[in-house]
Image (cartoon, grey):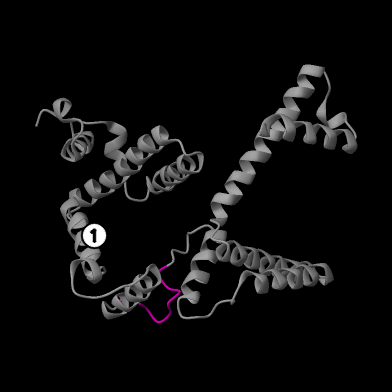
Amino acid sequence: MDIEANLNSFAALVEIIAKLRSPQGCPWDREQTHISIKGDLIEEAYEVLEAIDEQDMGKLCEELGDLLMQIVLQAQIASEDKDFELSDVVRQINEKLIRRHPHVFGDAKAENAQQVIVNWEALKRQEGKGGESILEGVPKETPSLAYSQAIQRRAARVGFDWKDVDGVIEKLAEEVAELKAATEHQQRVREFGDLLFTLANIARKLDIDLEGSLRRANERFYRRFSYMEQVCRERGIALESLPLEEQDALWEEAKRSIEQ
């Protein structure tokens, strides 16, 4: 294949990765293993999420390409080790999608999204992939807040859920009171975890992606605090020398300036 003449094809990407891994390829690429590039895979996934949060479609297109490259590279390493081929990856996901959507590719019925979820879990159990608990299958390396929402969603599928968000908010007040009442460090650690878990539940009930929401809050803090630092540099003032009241005033100025 003339790679440069077929840059819009998936086959070209596969061939490029194979060439990079070949004896005539790139020394760095040849050295990589499943483990060595695991962090890169996670990083690329987060960059995709960042592009989605920013609603930057050009950036999303680029970051999806970087993520796809990581997938193809992992498959190429497996192919060289005689573990599996990229075609096996594609075949298995195609088979799974068809098998778990019988309401699309078969005669089953699903009137709404909730019924699709119920059917999906039933099909997983039929495949022997349901595990002893419906909470199994959520990767342990998932960030803790996202993990909380994931296991809460799974519990809700079998009806173990608050009737409405008001009940969870009342629970939040209860958890705050328990945190305030805690006197020992380990007790505070426990109660703070319960508080975060309840916040994750509220976010789920309000259909808020907790990780995405917190990322955006982090970004707002970063922009506002950087504004404060820049203003202090322009005014010849050391930020740390200002009393808290003046720092708070600068913070409010940052909020007004940046959010406009």
Q: Residue at x 50, y 43 (%)?
A: 53
Q: Quadrant of the C terminus?
A: top right
Task: Name the residue that disc number 1 marks.
Answer: 93
Residue 115: image location, x then y, percent:
36, 74
> Does 52 appear in magenta?
no
Position of residue 129 in the picture relative to residue 137 (left or right): left
Q: What residue sits 67% from the left and 74% below the top?
A: 167
Q: Is residue 136 magenta?
A: yes
Question: Which residue appears at 26% of the width and 31% of the height?
Answer: 26
Q: Nearer the viewer, residue 40 or 207?
A: 207
Who is closer to the viewer here, 178 or 70? Answer: 178
- On the image, the x and y values in percent for residue 93 come to 24, 60
* Image location (x, y in percent) of residue 45: 42, 46
Label 1: few (<14), some (14–19) or many (≥20) C-alpha neighbours in 10 Å: few
Q: Is residue 211 visible?
A: yes
Looking at the rendered structure, the secondary structure element under dot 1 is: helix
Q: Is residue 221 left or right of residue 53?
A: right
Horizontal side of residue 235 vs 72, given as left or right: right
**Three-letter code, disc 1:** Ile
Which range is magenta? 129-137
Q: Residue at x 82, y 67 (%)?
A: 180
Q: Is residue 230 above or below residue 31?
A: above
Q: Main secondary structure of the magenta part?
A: loop
Q: Is residue 83 visible?
A: no
Does 235 sit above or below residue 83? above
Where's residue 150, x and y in %? 49, 66
* Side of 115 where 202 appears, left or right: right
Q: Residue furthest left?
A: 1
